[in-house]
Image (cartoon, coloured by chain):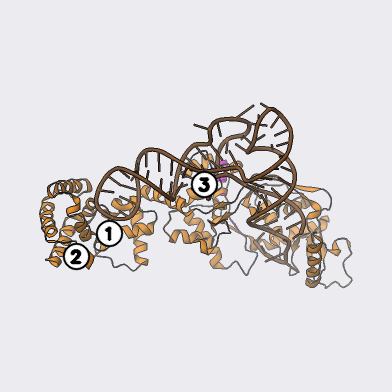
Amino acid sequence: MMHIGTARTALFNWLYARHRGGKFLIRVEDTDRERSTPEAVEAIFEGMDWLGLAPDAEPIFQFSRAERHREVVMELLERGGAYRCYMSVEELAEEREKARAEGRPIRSPWRDRAPPAGMNQPFVVRLRAPIDGETVVNDLVKGEVSFRNRELDDLILLRADGSPTYNLAVVADDHDMGITHVIRGDDHLSNTPRQILIYQGMGWPLPAFGHLPMIHGPDGAKLSKRHGAQGVREFADMGYLPEAMRNYLARLGWGHGDDEIFTDGQAIAWFDIADVVGAPARMDWPKLNHLNQHYIRLADDKRLMGLVFEVLRSRDVHLPRDFADRLSRTIPLVKEGAKTVLELADLVMFALKPRPIELDAKARALFTGEVVGRIGRLAAALALAPVWKPAEMADTLKGFAENEGGFGKFGPALRAILAAGAVAPDLASALAALGREESLGRIDDALSQVQ
RNA sequence: GGUCCCUUCGUCUAUCGGUUAGGACACCAGAUUUUCAAUCUGGGAAGAGGGGUUCGACUCCCCUAGGGACUGCCA
């Protein structure tokens, strides 16, 4: 799964790279073999692809560079910037407990001790972090953040099994890949000084760092399943458009004056890390809906047809043979009111109902003798209508309503007929969407049931 | 416990020492009306608390409170 916070981080990186004319690179940090399954990796690519964030080079898999990472550790060892620590797991646990009680970081006794006599003892390699002074992170978002080195522990670079850890791998990869800007989640801010120490130990130049705040649920707590969604895939399934998602996510933690709705081009032109807000943001579904509605209106009808078709298929809706025609006539007439593609699918249902339509008891109750007469006269009037388009239908209905004493005299009944148990748009649009034959046919169906 | 980050309407944000603190979403009211929407008009709504600095603080500094991250041989 690709978390929504990850998606925004990716978006900001993408926007910034485009803004600066730089490159947007993807690296899969898969050093944890347990967690990074092929499915998990695929989900990330899928999410990026759906969001429309294409990298400028082939993705790099961190695990494949393990040999290089070990090489870096060896060099650091030679330079004296790291040391072998022979603490057992039990000893470590004990030290951790003690350190926490004393409110200090973990210390290894092997930092200043010669290796043990027996050469076969397992060990990890730890960074030899300085004790004095402080390490300053000049963060693009948070500003200058300084840490006293004595508060930093000697983090593990190489595990006992010889595999590199995340913090080491990240630094080595960022350096080798020529990364100039590290823009990542807030949760890495306290790792940064330790990573800087690795850069310094290797004599490597520092990239610029920028730490983005997290995205919380509407209640301010960490975003989780109970908030509706946390993965990009789920947003797609809920009927959100990727361009709406980009616009929404861009506004979460970043702003450009009063601009709310903007194109990718504008976002790229305006985006600057310096303008990113330092505080965490909450997920706001109504606002996402609003943006999505806007982008659905803008969306190409053919594309919406495809999306709606997928939804209908997943719902096992029975589709008439000419469903494509029906969809293409209906979608443009109802898409104004849809906040998601799922809603759009709901709004289109009335046009797919099979004939003969059936009126339920509530609908039948609308057909008093008078109403039956009016619907009959309306059918005759409609049969003469030359053009079945919303504006013309509206005129016809309006003229009819004037003669018959208002819409209230036949509107509800006509609605029941055209909607056939689903939700339908305004009557003129419904008639236009259904077309002459279907509309008149449904009226016949109805009249034969109430007479 | 320790270190670090964060705090403007309900929400996302604008403001970069001097504004009637602006916009958007949401909400409320009205208009429209053939259901539900959509649309249009109008409205209410904010600087966490306390100290400083300053002629003047939302804005700079300190403290407190609240929220969060890290504190893994996870990433």
Q: Quadrant of residue A71?
A: bottom right
Residue designated by label 2 = A364
Which circle's residue, 1 or 3, is located before the other in the chain? 3
Which circle's residue, 2 or 3, is located before the other in the chain? 3
- Chain letter for orange, please: A
Circle 3 SS class: helix
Residue A349 in the image: state x and y as whole percent: 29, 61
Disc 1 with disc 2 on a shared chain? yes
Q: Chain of mark 3?
A: A
**Mark 2 or mark 3: which is in front?**
2
Residue A33 among those drawn in magenta: yes
Residue A265 in the image: state x and y as whole percent: 48, 42
Q: Foreground residue, A353 or A242?
A: A353
Magenta span covers which residues? Answer: A13-35
Q: Chain of mark 2?
A: A
Q: CA distance from mark 2 to mark 3?
A: 50 Å
Disc 1 with disc 3 on a shared chain? yes
Which circle's residue, 1 or 2, is located before the other in the chain? 1
Q: Foreground residue, A67 or B15?
A: B15
Residue designated by label 1 = A324
Residue designated by label 3 = A251
- Chain letter for brown, please: B
Task: Judge whether residue A306 can be spotted in this image.
Answer: no
Residue A119 in the image: state x and y as whole percent: 85, 71
The type of residue carrying mark 2 is: Arg
Q: Are marks 1 and 3 in contact (CB under 8 Å)?
A: no
| Location of residue A402 with respect to A50 vertically, above or below | above
Total numbered badges shown on the rendered structure: 3
The type of residue carrying mark 3 is: Arg
